[in-house]
């Protein structure tokens, strides 16, 4: 890989430029802290920024505030084999990061660096540390040894123990301005028209990477078909069994959309219907609709949390739909 393509790859989120420059300044003046934590909504680029920072810190010859993409260190990161970079992530089929993982992670960070003098531990998603895992991490967070950094990423700071977040240097990654995000999306998706890009961006609450993901695959189409199915249930036109049969194929994505639309419909009942529901019927704004939608939203969030578990999602979805169906009488 040439330096040019490497730079394009890591620098392809223009709305993060300001934050990257702030990180460069912090590094230059020794103000970064040893446990920067990136916070913000899903899809705004927190992880991309954290990965960039990892490259920037480990690069042996950064140029103009960017990782060079050519040195031994950059090349090893690119191939996933850097011996001084340790990742603490969810194991497959697990919903929490476990204490044994943290112990191994801390032991690895204590090793002598193989290349250069720096080591980094990247923790994503930090809010999935369970209580014991978080406790095991506290001492390392507070007093990292030598040139060791812990970089944390979370969508959900509320789920993170205060003992952890209070030891980190919080860096909030904001949703970018809509025109800039929309231009970026349209550039990346020349095959889509601007209205589709805007719809995806609106559904993503302005988070460009989430919208990008939906526009790249069939995520947007899946979302719209779920929206229409839900509207059909309210108006009594949709067939429950065929909806569940469709949703169970991709439980993680389906639950996320069910949560998103419950939230949007709730907003529509309490305030004004958002544009993305313009073609979909609203439940009668009776006193009952709000609590039903809130219940649907919570259940869908729980479904999202369990999405990777080998459980009967079709049963959960049927139960979810029986709640949603109440809207036709609300
Ligand atoms: Zn480099």
Image: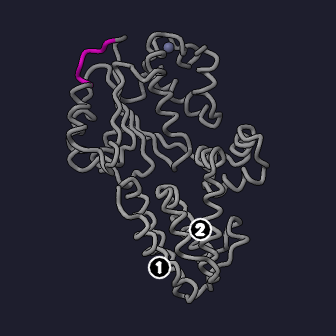
The answer to whether one can see residue 29 in this image is: no
Q: Is residue 258 above or below residue 211?
A: below
- Magenta extent: 109-114
Pick the residue in front: 9 or 139: 9
Foreground disc of the pair 2, 1: 1
Secondary structure at numbered mark 1: helix
Q: Is residue 18 above or below residue 294?
A: above
* Left or right, residue 76 beside residue 253: left
Label for residue 121? none
Pick the residue in front: 300 or 134: 300
Prevalent SS, magenta region:
loop
Residue annotated with mark 1: 323
**Residue drawn 35% across the image and 32% down it:** 87
Here the colouring is one colour
* Left or right, residue 321 beside residue 276: left
Q: Is residue 225 above or below residue 55?
A: below
* Left or right, residue 268 beside residue 184: left
**Residue drawn 63% across the image and 20% down it:** 5
Residue annotated with mark 2: 264
Image location of residue 185, percent across then percent down: 70, 42
**Residue drawn 71% across the image and 66% down it:** 275
**Which of the two labelled residues, at mark 2 and mark 1, occupies the earlier sequence position?**
2
Image location of residue 228, percent across then percent down: 65, 69
Q: Is residue 183 magenta?
A: no
Image location of residue 108, percent across then percent down: 25, 25
Which part of the image, by quadrant, shows the N terminus? Answer: top right
- Quadrant assignment, res 262: bottom right
């Amino acid at each position: 890989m040439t330096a040019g393509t490497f730079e394009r790859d890591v620098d392809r989120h223009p709305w993060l430029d300001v934050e990257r420059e702030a990180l460069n300044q912090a590094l230059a003046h020794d103000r970064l802290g040893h446990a920067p934590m990136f916070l913000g909504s899903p899809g705004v680029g927190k992880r991309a920024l954290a990965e960039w920072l990892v490259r920037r810190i480990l690069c042996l010859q950064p140029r103009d505030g960017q990782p060079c993409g050519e040195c031994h260190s950059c090349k090893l990161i690119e191939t996933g084999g850097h011996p001084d970079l340790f990742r603490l992530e969810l194991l497959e089929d697990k919903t929490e990061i476990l204490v044994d993982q943290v112990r191994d992670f801390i032991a690895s960070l204590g090793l002598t660096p193989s290349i250069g003098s720096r080591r980094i531990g990247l923790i994503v998603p930090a809010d999935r540390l369970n209580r014991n895992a978080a406790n095991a991490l506290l001492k390392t967070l507070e007093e990292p040894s030598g040139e060791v950094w812990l970089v944390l990423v979370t969508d959900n700071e509320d789920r993170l123990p205060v003992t952890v977040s209070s030891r980190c240097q919080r860096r909030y990654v904001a949703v970018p301005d809509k025109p800039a995000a929309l231009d970026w999306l349209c550039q990346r998706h020349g095959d889509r028209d601007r209205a589709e890009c805007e719809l995806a961006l609106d559904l993503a609450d302005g988070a460009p990477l989430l919208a990008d993901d939906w526009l790249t695959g069939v995520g947007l189409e899946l979302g719209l078909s779920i929206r229409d199915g839900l509207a059909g249930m309210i108006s009594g036109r949709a067939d429950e069994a065929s909806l569940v049969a469709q949703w169970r194929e991709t439980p993680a994505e389906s639950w996320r959309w069910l949560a998103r639309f419950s939230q949007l419909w709730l907003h529509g009942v309490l305030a004004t219907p958002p544009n993305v529901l313009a073609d979909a019927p609203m439940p009668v704004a009776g006193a009952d609709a709000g609590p039903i939608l809130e219940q649907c939203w919570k259940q869908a969030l729980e479904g999202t949390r369990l999405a990777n578990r080998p459980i009967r999602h079709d049963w959960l979805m049927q139960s979810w739909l029986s709640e949603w169906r109440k809207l036709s009488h609300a």
